[in-house]
Amino acid sequence: MSAQTLPAPATAARRGVGHGTGFWVVAAAFGVAMAFTVVPTPLWPLYQREAGYSTLMVTVAYAAYAVGVTISLFLAGHLSDRLGRRRVLLPALLVEIASGVLLLASTAFPAVLAGRALSGAAVGMITATATAHLVELHAAARPGAGRALAELVGTAANMGGFAVGSLTSGLLAEWAGAPLRTPYVVYLVLLAVVAAGVALVPETVAATSAPYRPQRVAVPAAARGRYATVAIGAFAAFAVLGLFASVAPGFVGGTMGHPSRALAGLVAFLSFGSGVTAQLVFARMPARRQVFGGLVALSLGLIATTAAVWLPSLPLFLIGGVTAGAGAGLLFKGSIGTVFSISEPATRGEALAGLFLAGYLGLSIPILGFGFATAAVSTEVALAGFATVVVALAAVVGIRTVR
């Protein structure tokens, strides 16, 4: 049974909060939730110095987040269609708060591993739910206005949240004291505030009694070749984003000798921020060109990043991060646009689920491979291997797209 949209006036009256206000409350909650997931990014070098983490432990902790997202995406990411948007979004925020409490309470590896997995589980519930809720709240507040604003705000909240979260965490760690505690405290307060706000937001979906089933993945039969191509592209794009969200700050602090936590946060901010910017600037570009442009920028940026670590050169590293991040953002947007064009409306959600699965596998498997490689070879050699694999995948996507 499909979700049933509630009548807008009745819902607003019952909750006492307008749909327009609710739209911005959900947008804020979405952004804060995404920002919280990258709070550890500029802190990983501190975990290595003060808690004795190895590069492998950092990559495993990061991968725990990606695994949590993947499992949650297919077990609970679609539940808002039958239970209601607010009824899923609010518990997901509470799960993220529980994650923050674990990360605040201890730097022990098991606690951090559990905290990151919980954070991923929350995000798997939040992404699709918040995106759908934004579209429905906007439609109720401004009938006939189209989805452009809701989609723009959703994009900004998602990847923009990653950018802002890494930067603010680095700044707090650098100048607020207690660097492994203060960022979590600040974001726990923010999460509590937005959770309270979400509790007052109008519900837009009537609960149904449809039986539970995990999310399905549907590949369009008539376009499996194109679907496989963009799935590989999503894998490569997320692999690059995972690099800058996990071990890249360690390169800046270790290999390049710049231990500033603010600088570590800036590296991730520039990478994610350039991804958002590229998506917005080239929003009207055809999906095929977005894919090609993303492939070129991602490959050039990753090559520059690898060269910067070998030299070492901080300016080149920053340039490479911006270029690779822009390429990853554009490649993923083009991949989503391609899936929209080749899938039927009735199975579009399931087709997108497959694309996100490929992306989150890219977020975990290559980074885990990098971590295990550092146990046998130097960081520079491991990064060169990582870059070679991702650039080769980008070349495969380019060749398949031409064919």
Image: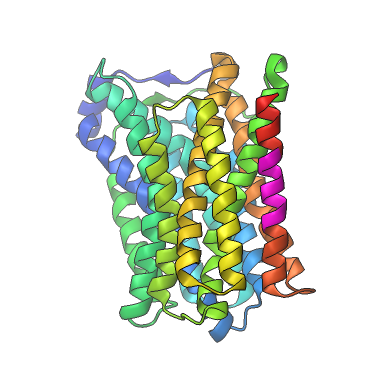
All told, the count of numbered labels is 0
Q: Position of residue 165 (x, y in %)?
A: 39, 59
Q: Quadrant of the N terminus?
A: top right
Range of the magenta residues? 387-395
Horizontal side of 135 relative to 334 (left or right) equals left
Residue 14 is left or right of residue 87, and the answer is left
Is residue 75 visible in this depiction of the protein? Answer: no
Residue at image x 54%, y 18%?
341
Q: Is residue 54 above or below residue 29?
A: below
Q: Viewer-proximal residue, 308 or 103?
A: 308
Q: Position of residue 134 (x, y in %)?
A: 35, 32
Task: Locate residue 168, reporting x and y percent.
Answer: 34, 65
Comparing 142 with 393, the one in front is 393
Q: Position of residue 163 (x, y in %)?
A: 40, 55
Camera-side residue of 27 and 231:
231
- Kindly indicate the quadrant of the structure image that contains residue 216: top right
The rendered magenta stretch, by its main secondary structure, is classed as: helix
In the image, is 28 to the left or to the right of 352? left
- Quick check: is 127 in the magenta stretch? no
